[in-house]
Image (cartoon, grey):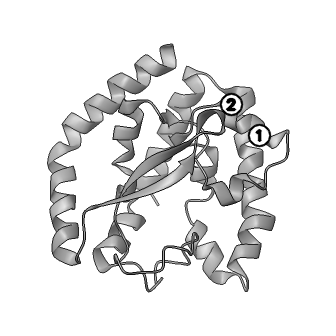
């Protein structure tokens, strides 16, 4: 209950405070390439239920969306302005609306696509007992994920065999530590990571 009130207050405050920036980003995306400003993707959330997650569009609309991993900032599917948004993590801002709606939280395990959730074992599915978040320990630890994948000889193998298990381990850590003070700590670490990257 406290967490939901916290999410409601700060997501609404964030949307109101950032509304001029959100509008400017949306306009810039439209000017940079054809297509709408938002990218909608199905992710797996609380209780293993799919939901639609909102992001600012950072790829060309006619790019191959079947490739779920982004390989470095030089991925040919990413627009010029999209590269800037990704580097500054501004493409994630529309998820404040997910938090306001209630299918995401400010802090919680980052939601995966169904393909990768299907790799979880029974113990790891405990992650799905929590509402997914905009940020978590794994988001901080793997803020350079696309660069790690770029250096890998097989990006899919690197993700499923090394990065995903590490993310899951960090999510399990969050399950054991969850609480309002942990959330505040993670939000602070996230801001620090973005501002001083």
Q: Residue extending furthest top?
A: 1
Residue at 49% of width from left, 73% of height from top? 65
Residue at 46% of width from left, 57% of height from top? 41
**Depicted 10 relative to depicted 25: above or below:** above
Label 2 – label 1 distance at C-alpha: 7 Å
Q: Is residue 14 left or right of residue 47?
A: left
- Residue 148 in the image: state x and y as whole percent: 64, 73
Q: Which numbered tag is attached to residue 185?
A: none
Q: What residue would you read off at disc 2?
A: 129
- Callout 2: few (<14), some (14-19), or many (20+) C-alpha neighbours within 10 Å? few
Image quadrant in which you'd find residue 131: top right
Q: What residue would you read off at disc 1?
A: 125
Residue at 78% of width from left, 56% of height from top? 119
In-front residue for pair 147/68: 68
- Residue 145 in the image: state x and y as whole percent: 60, 66
Q: Is residue 128 left or right of residue 191?
A: right
**Depicted 178 relative to depicted 115: above or below:** above
- Residue 146 in the image: state x and y as whole percent: 56, 71
SS at mark 1? helix
Image quadrant in which you'd find residue 38: bottom left
- Callout 1: few (<14), some (14-19), or many (20+) C-alpha neighbours within 10 Å? some
The total number of labels drawn is 2
- Residue 55 in the image: state x and y as whole percent: 38, 55
In-front residue for pair 139/195: 139
Image quadrant in which you'd find residue 17: top left
Q: Residue extending furthest right?
A: 122
Are dots 2 and 1 in contact, CB under 8 Å? yes
SS at mark 2? helix
Q: Is residue 119 left or right of residue 134?
A: right
Residue at 36% of width from left, 69% of height from top? 58
């Amino acid at each position: 209950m406290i967490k939901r009130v916290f999410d409601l207050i700060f997501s609404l405050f964030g949307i109101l405070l950032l509304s001029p920036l959100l509008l400017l980003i949306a306009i810039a995306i439209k000017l940079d390439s054809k297509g709408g400003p938002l990218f909608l993707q199905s992710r797996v959330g609380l209780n293993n239920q799919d939901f639609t997650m909102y992001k600012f569009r950072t790829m060309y609309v006619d790019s191959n969306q079947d490739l779920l991993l982004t390989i470095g900032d030089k991925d040919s599917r990413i627009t010029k302005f999209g590269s800037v948004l990704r580097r500054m993590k501004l493409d994630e801002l529309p998820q404040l609306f997910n938090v306001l709606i209630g299918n995401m939280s400010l802090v919680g395990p980052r939601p995966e696509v169904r393909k990768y959730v299907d790799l979880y074992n029974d113990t790891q599915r405990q992650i799905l007992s929590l509402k997914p978040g905009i940020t978590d320990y794994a988001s901080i630890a793997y803020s350079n994920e696309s660069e790690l994948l770029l250096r890998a000889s097989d990006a899919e193998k690197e993700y499923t065999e090394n990065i995903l298990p590490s993310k899951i381990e960090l999510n399990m850590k969050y399950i054991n530590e969850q609480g309002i003070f942990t959330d505040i700590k993670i939000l602070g670490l996230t801001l620090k990571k973005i501002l001083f990257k």
